[in-house]
Image (tube, rainbow, N blue to C red):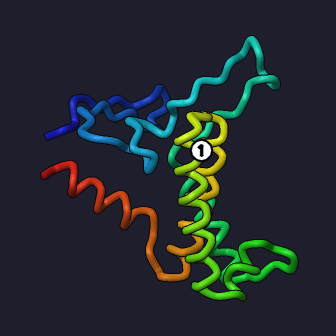
Amino acid sequence: QFVKDIFFDCDSDALLIKIEQVGAACHTNNKSCFYRRLDLENYGEAKKEYSSGILYDVYSTIIDRKENPKEGSYTNYLFDKGIDKTLKKVGEESAEVIIAAKNSSKPEIIYEVSDLCYHLSVLMAQTDVKWQDIFNELGSRREK
């Protein structure tokens, strides 16, 4: 019902299927995985832009550290110290976000929220919670 047209290429070894897309096709919740445009004028100098997919990447690295400890890794230090240490860091980072917001310092807010997201990711890995669980919960709240 969503297929609009189907084309063969010149030597019949590839198909192009035109569809009516419903919803996002990318795990970043974008319409397509191809949503970042390369700035050809400033190629090589362009600042890399990240999307929500970075949360998956960071979480994946944290899980990798959990399964394959790396000497000197701060993430492994948190795992070794246990959940109480991680909870303490989540509390500290939450307070630092509050102070940054009170001071109306956007760069400080960005820095502290990033620290909080990292420490929350470690906590999630320690308690077997995934970002998709969080996104699903937030999505269900949006529907209410």
Name the outermost residue toward the top: 41
The mark total stands at: 1
Q: Is residue 95 above or below residue 10?
A: below
Q: Which residue is mark 1?
A: 100
Residue at horizontal 62%, vertical 50%? 112
User: SS class of the residue under badge 1?
Assistant: helix
Identified by mark 1, the residue type is Ala
Residue nearest the viewer, comparing 72 with 22: 72
**Where residue 35 appears, x then y in whole percent?**
50, 31
Q: Is residue 71 above or below residue 50?
A: below
Residue 54 shows up from this direction: no
Q: Is residue 127 left or right of residue 47?
A: left
Residue at horizontal 56%, vertical 68%? 90
Residue nearest the viewer, comparing 20 with 16: 20
Q: Is residue 64 left or right of residue 131?
A: right
**Where residue 39 appears, x then y in whole percent?**
68, 18
Q: Is residue 36 left or right of residue 4?
A: right
Q: Is residue 112 above or below residue 45?
A: below
**Where residue 127 appears, x then y in whole percent?**
48, 82
Residue 50 shows up from this direction: yes
Q: Residues within 10 Å of mark 1 (few under 14, many from 20)?
A: some
Residue at horizontal 65%, vertical 41%? 108
